Image: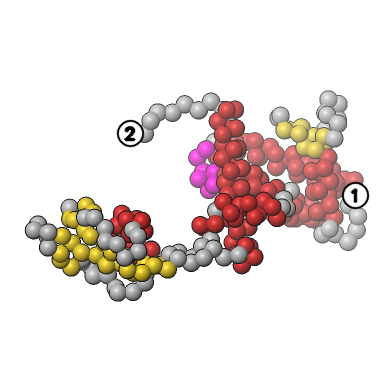
Amino acid sequence: MPMPRLLLLAGLLAGMVGSGISVVRQVPAAGLPSGAMAQVGERLILRDEWLKGVAAAASERRTPLTTAQQTQILDRLIDEELLVQHGLSLGLVEHDQRLRGQLIAEVLFSTTASLSDDAIAETELESFYRANVGLFVPPAQLRVQAWILGSAGERKAFLPPLPNSLLPLHKLQQYLGPELVKAAMLLPLGQESRPIANQGQQVVLLVSEQQLAPAPALEAVREPVLRELRRQRDERAVRELLDDLRQQYRVTRVDAQ
């Protein structure tokens, strides 16, 4: 039971006890499944849920709870469930974006929470690192020269001019753009490219220096590897949940235009 709800129950109980108000209702137990304390619509309020509320309220008091006070807690749980079901019937979840966001967040958390407690075997971690080592290698750096070919084949300065220094790929893209950077990465060191069509121009590239960082040892990047493994595992769990839900619920759609 979430802590705010437990505190609410404790606060309500304290207020009722202090004012002498009794909201005890006799609920027949006949027909309830074993372990259930009450039923509201189709929803069962289980004994464990009630005992958690009792324990939370008792922790705020110096004296044990009376039977009447424990019954009041069950009534509070029933009232809460009535309000929840009424809220659903009003369509609050469908129309209130804040509630929808909270509900989605709780579903995602419940889907992945159990995974976070699972121990990751060393062999699984090593296998994941070998398969995804490129995610943890420092980015390559290249020193690139570039020219634009004129209509007569003459070479003109490339604009904006590239610094005569090693640049990481993300920085190099600011000068060349992603397509030319991809071409530069495939070039042998010291060999000019053939003319490359780029934004209506013909471009020639030359990689004069490159610096490729070696893959670090697993121990040096253990924490980032663990985070990435858990992230991918969580994504996979959510995707599997959504795939299962698409089988359980009918989904009809049209193609976006």
Task: Tell me the residue that label 1 is attached to.
Answer: 66
Q: How many numbered discs sit on the rendered protein?
A: 2
Q: Residue at x 83, y 49 (%)?
A: 54
Q: Quadrant of residue 188?
A: bottom left
Image side of residue 159 versus residue 24, left or right: left
Camera-side residue of 154 and 127: 154
> What amino acid is labelled 2 in the image?
Gln
Determine if the magenta segment contains residue 239.
no
Q: Residue at x 45, y 65 (%)?
A: 212
* The disc label shown at residue 257, or none: 2
Residues under numbered marks 2 and 1 in contact, where contact means CB atoms less than 8 Å apart: no
Q: Residue at x 47, y 26 (%)?
A: 252
Camera-side residue of 116 and 8: 116
Q: Residue at x 89, y 52 (%)?
A: 65
| Secondary element at tag 2 | loop
Residue 135: horizontal and vertical position, in percent? 51, 57
The CA span between labels 2 and 1 is: 64 Å
Q: Residues within 10 Å of mark 1 (few under 14, many from 20)?
A: few
Q: Which SS type dominates the magenta stretch?
A: helix
Q: Is residue 166 above or below residue 150?
A: below
| Secondary element at tag 1 | loop
Which stretch did the figure color magenta? 94-103
* The disc label shown at residue 145, or none: none
N-terminal of the pair, mark 2 or mark 1, is: 1
Quadrant where the image shows the C terminus? top left
Determine if the magenta segment contains residue 101.
yes
Camera-side residue of 230 and 109: 230
> What amino acid is labelled 1 in the image?
Thr
